[in-house]
Image (spheres, coloured by chain):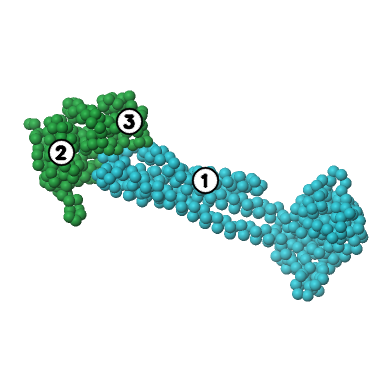
Chain colours: A cyan, B green
């Protein structure tokens, strides 16, 4: 007898596997869902962390990492230490310094009008400054205009973003006046928040010469802002203290505000690792779910296995069928998970106003992880199904 | 040179021992020939070894000793995959519990009888349609198995066994799950298939059914104790 060997067309292998899944729709869907959630969380965590990091890096890039601030030290014996009046002039003579500006403390409260009790300052401080501040800080004006050489001498104020909120300065369609100290001051503009100088958001700025003239402010800078040539930041930083205060260089404290943002980015990265770990656990549980469904399927479907052997299926055919089913479940789950992860990333990033970045490694890796889980989860049940003795399967099913 | 017309099935000194303590001798030195076109009833008590004999005849199980020849081919010389091929192409099984796949239509259950031959789907369906007509279920081909009666389901299972034009059909208590009316119609169907010249071996508990068949084999404790006929020469 010359018999052609048993043969199952590849398209039939797929059809048989899919048919078996379709016959157990709910259970298949639930086990694929386990994988989907795992993959979705991995993709979303990677996507969101990249999107938020890129938003932060964009911010840092836009603000520049070359801003240094000089403040009077608060160290031992610092007491009333203030920076010398000449600070701005001397710092701007350092060749690697691109721009310099300073703010001067003004001892006055800010009120919406002259009827507000004196102690309700709203936590708003007043600084005198020069028109170059906005450029040095890469700041932006939300309404009106910043101080100019013309308004520098006059009782004209620019309001920080938070201060404007607290004072109720929402628009400048009508002239707005604030009561600062014991005189009325005209509001020329409202600022956007400063990312690198958040204390100015809660302040009202007036011209430095106006501060001196109307409020007797001393022109000893509270803070000096210095824009430095990108390539010489560290070298410049090293000489600034001595430049500002040659007598007591230890009393000038120099910092780099962008370090703070970078620290925040690093902190978010560590959370990313945590969430990735959680996503991996979810994926593992999903994989176990698929393996579980497959193992139960092998036990429940002994009759089907026996029948298939009786109508000519080889062990390899049975093995391939169960393996295909596991792989299909995992692939469906992986595809759904990737789509879900992308959707979550899009939704959250857009809500946060971030640029959406989905790293290709998350897409490819997520899908590959699902397939790998399917292979691992399907291998054992498939081998077990192929080992079932047909007579036993038909008897006990 | 093999016999030009070897019997459809031949058992030569077949024993089957299931390991255990004590080991169970399900078949004990059984020798029998089933000729082409014969219709044979296998009778015996539960546990006498009837099903083991049927499984061994159909190569679902291999004997511990002795040999099984199908159309003159000694199956003990074949690999597992070759035995699968024999089952797929030369043997038609019918079981007490039908074993229909609930998720697919009747026609595809029947067409599955050809699934592992590599035949294309249109070809399988065409063959299935013809066999369904033959067993009287042409009108039910697009129904799901759970929409059929027990007797109809067994007809579908018989159609599945026949669709590959097997050398013989092995039926293990095909009426065991059916009421008497359905049983009768299934037995009638088997007889009519026999009339068409097919080789059929039926295990049955039902003495009336067995008595109606041209040849009976009685099994007791794994031994063939009675054989009412031999191969017509």
Pointer 2 and pointer 1 on the same chain? no
Query: Residue visible at 79% across and 49% down?
Result: A141
In space, the residues marked 2 and 3 are separated at their CA atoms by 29 Å
- Residue at the spot of label 2: B43
Asked if A125 appears above or below A340 in the picture, the reply is below
Q: Earlier in the sequence, mark 2 or mark 3?
A: 2
- Residue at the spot of label 1: A338
- Residue A100 lies, in percent from the top left, at 80, 60
Contact? badges 1 and 3 (CB < 8 Å): no
* Chain designation of label 2: B
Q: Residues within 10 Å of mark 3 (few under 14, many from 20)?
A: some
Pointer 2 and pointer 3 on the same chain? yes
In space, the residues marked 1 and 3 are separated at their CA atoms by 43 Å
Q: Is disc 3 placed on a helix, strand or loop?
A: loop
Query: Residue visible at 27% across and 32% down?
Result: B154
- Residue A220 lies, in percent from the top left, at 85, 66
In space, the residues marked 2 and 1 are separated at their CA atoms by 60 Å
Query: Residue visible at 26% across and 40% down?
Result: A310
Comparing marks 1 and 3, which lies closer to the viewer? Answer: 3
Kindly identify which numbered label has been placed on residue B148.
3
Asked if B21 appears above or below A219 in the picture, the reply is above
Q: Quadrant of residue A84?
A: bottom right
Contact? badges 2 and 3 (CB < 8 Å): no
Is B37 situated left or right of B122 in this image?
left
- Residue A61 lies, in percent from the top left, at 68, 54
Q: Nearer the viewer, residue A46 or A348?
A: A348
Q: Quadrant of residue A124?
A: bottom right
Is B143 situated left or right of A224 in this image?
left
Q: Is disc 2 placed on a helix, strand or loop?
A: strand
Query: Residue visible at 75% across and 72% down?
Result: A75
């Amino acid at each position: 007898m010359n018999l052609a060997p048993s043969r199952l067309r590849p398209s039939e292998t797929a059809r048989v596997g899919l048919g078996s899944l379709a016959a157990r729709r709910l259970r298949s869907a639930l086990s694929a869902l386990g994988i989907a959630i795992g993959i979705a969380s991995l993709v979303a965590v990677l996507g969101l962390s990249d999107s938020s990091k890129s938003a932060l890096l964009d911010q840092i890039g836009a603000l520049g990492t070359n801003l240094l601030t000089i403040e009077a030290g608060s160290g031992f014996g610092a007491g009333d230490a203030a920076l010398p009046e000449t600070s701005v002039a001397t710092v701007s003579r350092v060749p690697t310094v691109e721009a310099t500006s300073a703010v001067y403390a003004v001892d006055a409260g800010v009120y919406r009008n002259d009827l507000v009790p004196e102690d309700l300052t709203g936590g708003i401080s007043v600084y005198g400054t020069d028109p170059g501040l906005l450029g040095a800080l890469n700041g932006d004006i939300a309404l009106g205009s910043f101080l100019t050489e013309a308004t520098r001498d006059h009782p004209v104020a620019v309001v920080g973003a938070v201060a404007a909120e607290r004072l109720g300065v929402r628009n400048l369609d009508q002239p707005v006046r604030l009561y600062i100290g014991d005189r009325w001051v005209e509001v020329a503009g409202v600022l956007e928040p400063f990312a690198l100088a958040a204390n100015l958001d809660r302040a009202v700025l007036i011209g430095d010469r106006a501060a001196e003239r109307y409020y007797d402010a001393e022109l000893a800078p509270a803070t000096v802002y210095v824009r430095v040539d990108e390539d010489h930041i560290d070298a410049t930083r090293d000489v600034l203290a001595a430049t500002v205060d040659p007598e007591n260089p230890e009393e000038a404290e120099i910092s780099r505000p962008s370090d703070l943002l970078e620290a925040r980015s690093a902190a978010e990265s560590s959370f990313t690792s945590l969430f990735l770990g959680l996503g991996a656990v979810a994926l593992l549980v999903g994989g176990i779910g698929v393996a579980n469904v497959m193992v139960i399927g092998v036990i429940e479907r002994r009759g089907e296995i026996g029948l298939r052997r009786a109508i000519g299926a080889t062990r390899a055919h049975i093995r391939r069928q169960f393996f295909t089913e596991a792989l299909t479940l995992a692939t469906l789950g992986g595809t759904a998970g990737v789509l879900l992860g992308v959707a979550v990333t899009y939704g959250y990033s857009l809500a946060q106003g971030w640029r959406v970045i989905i790293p290709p490694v998350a897409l490819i890796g997520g899908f590959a992880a699902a397939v790998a889980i399917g292979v691992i989860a399907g291998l054992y049940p498939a081998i077990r199904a192929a080992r079932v003795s047909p007579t036993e399967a038909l008897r006990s099913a | 040179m093999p016999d030009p017309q070897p019997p459809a099935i031949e058992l030569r000194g077949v024993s089957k021992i299931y390991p255990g303590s004590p080991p169970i001798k399900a078949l004990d030195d059984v020798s029998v020939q089933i000729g082409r076109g014969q219709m044979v009833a296998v009778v015996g008590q539960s546990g006498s070894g009837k099903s083991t004999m049927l499984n061994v005849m159909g190569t679902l199980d291999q004997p511990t000793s002795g040999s099984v020849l199908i159309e003159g081919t000694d199956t003990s010389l074949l690999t597992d995959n070759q035995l699968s091929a024999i089952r797929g192409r030369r043997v038609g099984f019918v079981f007490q519990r039908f074993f229909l796949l609930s998720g697919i239509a009747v026609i595809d259950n029947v067409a599955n009888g050809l699934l592992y031959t590599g035949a294309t789907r249109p070809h399988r369906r065409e063959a299935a349609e013809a066999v369904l007509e033959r067993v009287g279920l042409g009108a039910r081909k697009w129904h799901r198995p759970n929409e059929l009666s027990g007797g109809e389901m067994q007809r579908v299972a018989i159609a599945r066994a026949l669709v590959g034009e097997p050398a013989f059909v092995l039926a293990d208590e095909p009426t065991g799950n059916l009421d008497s009316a359905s049983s009768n119609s299934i037995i009638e169907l088997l007889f009519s298939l026999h009339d068409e010249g097919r080789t059929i071996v039926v295990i049955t508990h039902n003495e009336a059914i067995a008595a109606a068949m041209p040849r009976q084999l009685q099994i007791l404790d794994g031994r063939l104790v009675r054989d009412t006929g031999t191969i017509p020469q």
